[in-house]
Amino acid sequence: MKSINLKVNGKEIKADIKPNLLLSTFLRENLNLTGTHIGCDTSQCGACAIHLDGDAVKSCAYLAIQVDGSDITTIEGIADGDVLHPMQQSFHENHGLQCGFCTPGMVMSAIKLVENNPKLSEDDIRSGLEGNICRCTGYHNIVKSIKSAATVMGG
């Protein structure tokens, strides 16, 4: 067992883990943060996207031991109490989800996409989401949701 210390959704966490434990599994099974979805375990689908030290990353592509000392935000940590993050609110208002499986990863990736460029075009959004797969929608309402949230987030 190895010991790690990190901050998750603003809370200091200390845990003893096996060195081969995936970060996605650690978040879901050790911390019960089940909004981080496991879709492929091969870093192809993006359902497990989180914010790691300020960047959107696929948590199944990291071992938990690799993030020792890091600051992590999951989908559970972006709302302000009962007030949804503007991206979450926009996905809700613009029907940017169907089954919802890809939604947490899509929202986490979209937040960083907008933070890095609030004046995104539709092509910028579609290109920026290439690492996130949705099997239900045609991405039209996802793009619409991100575009709408960008205006609220400073675009």
Image (cartoon, rainbow, N blue to C red):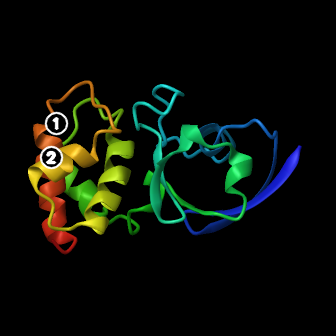
- Closer-to-camera residue (35/110): 110
- Closer-to-camera residue (105/95): 105
Quadrant where the image shows the N terminus: top right
Please indicate whether residue 137 sits to the left or right of residue 44 in the image: left
Please indicate whether residue 108 sits to the left or right of residue 130 in the image: right
Expressed as whole percent of the image width and height from the top left, the position of residue 120 reads: 15, 60
The answer to the question of whether label 1 and label 2 lie on touching residues, with beta carbons closer than 8 A, is: yes
Residue 29, picture quadrant: top right
Q: What secondary structure is marked by label 1?
A: loop
Q: What secondary structure is marked by label 2?
A: helix
Q: Which residue is pictured at 56% across the width and 37% down the height?
A: 60
Q: Which mark is residue 143?
A: 2
**From mark 1 to mark 2, how far is it between C-alphas?**
6 Å
Tag 1: Cα neighbours inside 10 Å, few (<14), some, or many (≥20)? some
Expressed as whole percent of the image width and height from the top left, the position of residue 149 reads: 18, 61
Q: Which residue is pictured at 13% across the width and 57% down the height?
A: 147
Tag 2: Cα neighbours inside 10 Å, few (<14), some, or many (≥20)? many
Q: In the image, what residue type sits under mark 2?
A: Val
Q: In the image, what residue type sits under mark 1?
A: Tyr
Q: Is residue 63 above or below residue 42?
A: below
Residue where numbered disc 1 is placed: 139
- Closer-to-camera residue (98/66): 66
Query: Quick one: which residue is furthest to the bottom in this view?
Result: 154
Q: Is residue 19 above or below residue 144?
A: above
